[in-house]
Amino acid sequence: MRATGITVIGFAALLAAGAAPAAGRWSGFIAATTDYVYRGVSQTHGHPALQGDLHYEAAGGTYLGTWVSNVHPADGTDSTLEFDLYLGHSWLLSDDWRARLTAVHYEYLDTPWQGPKDYDELVGSVTLRDRLTASVAWAPNTWRYSVADGPARRAATSYEMTGRQPVGRGWYLSGGAGYYDLSSFGEGGYWFWNAGLGFGRSHYQVDLSYFGLDAPDWAFLYNGAESADWALTVTWKF
């Protein structure tokens, strides 16, 4: 799971449920979070992040956009920017079901650490009543989890399930779990999960979430990266 990040979980809340708009529209958000969390691992070394998104959704269900955040994923390195570009399509299968397919390119601008930085991911998801989302994300050229010397790009797959349940007067419960398959790196993979409480009204949303991992000492915590605990995120959508 990702704190306001551009994973399929974020798309479920970012793009409106129901039929595609009768005409194309621009929308997005600005968010501040105490920790930028990506699949259970802190991308800011436990420090705050300022994030933003801008996307366009066409009448037929195609959307494209960009997402940006400051990052500080490794110990002993300077902060830099993560800049994501994404393109996808959404299908309304029935009154209850929606499917999405999204291609994402992850770019790290002016990175101070060694090795390749950018990579790509293809994400497929199905959502039930805008409350339960299952997704599979496949990256052919992931780099960050290699324990070998020098640059290395290998395939990785993430499986995720998340849910969101309104409890009245703008409050809701959220949670999810996933498995990140990193077997091509020789480390097998790891489970990650989160649970939280949120409140939303009009264009504003506040989320408090707890994150967990099953093996915080594995090599995927590269260069002193940290597993995440709590994150408080405030979002303004437009």
Image (cartoon, rainbow, N blue to C red):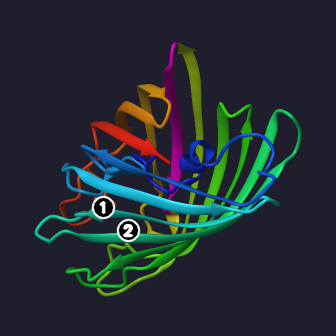
* Marking on residue 219: 1
Q: Amino acid at mark 1?
A: Ala
Of callouts 1 and 2, the N-terminal one: 2
Q: Residue 186: where, in percent of width, then height?
A: 44, 67
Residue 33 lies within the magenta run:
no
Q: Provide the major secondary structure of the magenta segment.
A: strand
Q: Residue 71: where, in percent of width, then height?
A: 27, 63
Q: Secondary structure at mark 2?
A: loop
Eyeballing the image, is 67 above or below 143? above
* Marking on residue 145: 2
Q: Residue 6: where, in percent of width, then height?
A: 50, 57
Which span of residues is magenta-colored?
169-182
Q: Secondary structure at mark 1?
A: loop
Eyeballing the image, is 33 above or below 71? above
Residue that extends furthest to the right in the rendered view of this protein: 94
Q: Are marks 1 and 2 in contact (CB under 8 Å)?
A: yes
